[in-house]
Amino acid sequence: MKFVDEYRDGKSAAEYAALLAGITTRPWTIMEVCGGQTHSIVKNGINELLPEKITLVHGPGCPVCVTPAEILDKAMELAARPDVIFCSFGDMLRVPGNATDLFQVRAAGGDVRIVYSPLDAVKIASENPAKEVIFFAVGFETTAPANAMSVIEAKRRGLRNFSLLVSQVIVPPAIGAILSSPANLVQGFLAAGHVCTVMGFREYEPIAEKYRVPIVVTGFEPLDILQGIAMCVLQLEKGQAIVENQYSRSVRREGNQPAQEAVARAFRIVKRKWRGIGEIPASGLGLAEEFFLFDAEARFGPVAYGADAASECIAGQVLQGVRKPPECPAFGTKCHPDHPLGAPMVSSEGACSAYYRYRRTASAGTS
Amino acid sequence: MGDPPMPNPFIGKVSPALGEADGADGIDFSLECPLPSSRHDRITLGHGGGGRLMHSLIDRVFKKAFNDPALAAAHDGADLPSPPGRLAMTTDSYVVHPLFFPGSDIGAMAVNGTVNDLAMCGASPLYLTASFILEEGLEMATLEKVVASMAGAAAAAGIRVVTGDTKVVERGKGDGIFICTAGVGAIGHNLAINPASVKPGDAVLLSGDIGRHGMAVMAVRENLGFTSDLRSDCACLWPGVEALLKAGIQVHCLRDLTRGGLATSLVEISGTGKVRILVNESAIPVGEAVQGACEVLGLDPLYVANEGRFVAFVPASEAERALAALRSTVHCEGATRIGTVESGNGVVMKSTIGASRPLDMLSGEQLPRIC
């Protein structure tokens, strides 16, 4: 398939593997931020092609994984109401809150629907005026523009029965939090190509400068990731720390400005709790004042945040790249995709699920 | 026809409600059933009630379409000749939404799915039973279209529809039509075609490109708006299997790839057969429309459902001959070798970039990813 196969070519991959083997003289730890990249790395076995000195750690960029249990509990409370049609992206349905998940709410009679676009939820709202239609607005900067468009469109149509339960987070503050942590091991970053397609990469330049880390905006195909790693290692070996763009077929420095304008109109920056990590200031999006009426928390009551319950699960450390999934005492025993203890075991983008599915064990080496 | 009939609330009394609803037909004056079924353009509870309505439905729709002497005998069961040798028997249920989708429909799928399960035993199709669970309010024209499609698929596969059953459930308690089948086939070979026969050194053959059925149904069900040529691969696999047997191939195992897709079937066979299966990702044919839709939705075609594809495990020395036999039949023109069996366990896939990874079953259905 055009624009896919050429980025999965075995011969070119072998050439990058040889290049990396040639340029890597010291051990380096590199974090891929995005869950989509984690999935691609593990699925394609990219770790096997890397020199032993390179360690990849998996970042917090899985929207399913970082959504706090309290918001999920709120989602389930709302979805169970008989007057509500609760719409969500598919992979949120399996994520456990503190007690249950949306699939079980649906089985018990809740009207929970999988949609492929938040605009589908707007359509459902206009077709069901007697119902409250709530869309679970989850994700990073990638989902924010479409979610923003949904409330802009709902307002334009004058819908009074549509709202968003918002759990939007943004990447740069999370990178800042990881780099500020005393436990940090990460020396270079692969930034998320889709996030930067929307937002551009200007906002990463001060981070690279402040923390002296190379940041390479990287795509998702095997050759994208191999090239991104090679660009990062080249900088590390040379002592450079700048932002580079590997994913230039999709990303421009200034990003997608109409998308940014929609986000800026519909949302404002707020503090957010990240599951397993904790509260990070100015790390998320909440609805702007203009769209107050479309905020499910304003309409149905706010999410009640509390302290995370003590658990064997080390999801927080996994999400910060401090530990690997197989280091968790529950990995593959008490915690597996059929019975996840933590969110990274749920989504196919979650590091634990990816490890479990492709059975990468600590002894398998490289990653 | 099957189970004893349910009590019919309409027998023995005039039903003014029904009479009003269908207008003053004024043709049949019997007290038992005031309405000739020909005037029903929708299924009513009475069509499952065991009375005239039901018999009229059986005569006018099922017997007419399937046109089989065993059905015409109108007995509780079918009295059938038995072929020499062993028999294969299978059963399956069909629930699909929508009932009609690009490339096929629930009727053809019910016949082909059952015939394919027999074919995977190396059995030629003989007899099929069909039980219909119909939802009150189903359009008669829809039922007739589904039954005609079944009759066409059965004739094409050479299987006789010999007995059946009809039940009607209240509106809202079904999804239009559910079809339950049983199939009987004749085994005319002496091979033991099953996972336990798979041996290290076997070649793994795939009958064609994967993932078309699942993506075609998803595209219409979820109204994804793909304007592509995504069509279900729903097809009868017996001609392909028959060609292998006629060519004298020592077939060790056959498995049709339905729910869970290629990956799940390989994992099942590896587990039951206690062998390690190595497959080469770049050898697995995936059409552009399927790959494109999967890329957009974040799905893996290896786990997407098929209705007209199978894998065959044959001795490596016979692989080329087996491929030639398969490719000479309709629906298997794209047959190809995708891997090899070794001793050990699990399924290992060599990725397109040359690294390897284990394949596992999914915990549930595949869900589209957020981004």
Image (spheres, rainbow, N blue to C red):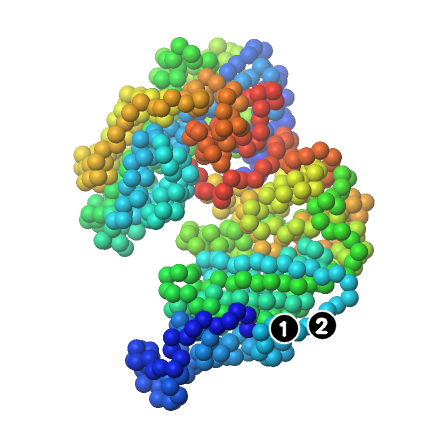
| Placement of the N terminus of chain A among the 4 image quadrants | top right
Q: Closest to the observer: A187 or A278?
A: A278
Q: Position of residue B253 (x, y in %)?
A: 71, 49
Find the distance from the CA under tag 2 to the CA under tag 1: 10 Å
Density class for disc 1 (Cα within 10 Å; few <14, some 14-19, many ≥20) is some
Label 1 resides on the chain identified as B
Q: Identify the residue position indicated by label 1 in the image.
A: B78
Q: Say what secondary structure mark 1 lies in.
A: loop
| Placement of the C terminus of chain A among the 4 image quadrants | top right
Q: Say what secondary structure mark 2 lies in.
A: loop
Residue B260 can be seen in this image: yes
Location of residue A108 with respect to A143 vertically, above or below: below
Q: Is residue A45 left or right of residue A299?
A: right
| Residue type (three-letter) at the residue carrying disc 1 | Ala
**Same-chain status of marks 2 and 1:** yes
Q: Position of residue B67 (x, y in %)?
A: 60, 77
Location of residue B15 with respect to A8 vertically, above or below: below
Residue at image location 53% in from the left, 12% down from the top: A237
Residue B339 can be seen in this image: no
Mark linked to residue B81: 2
Q: Closest to the observer: B99 or B290?
A: B99
Residue at image location 45% in from the left, 59% down from the top: B98
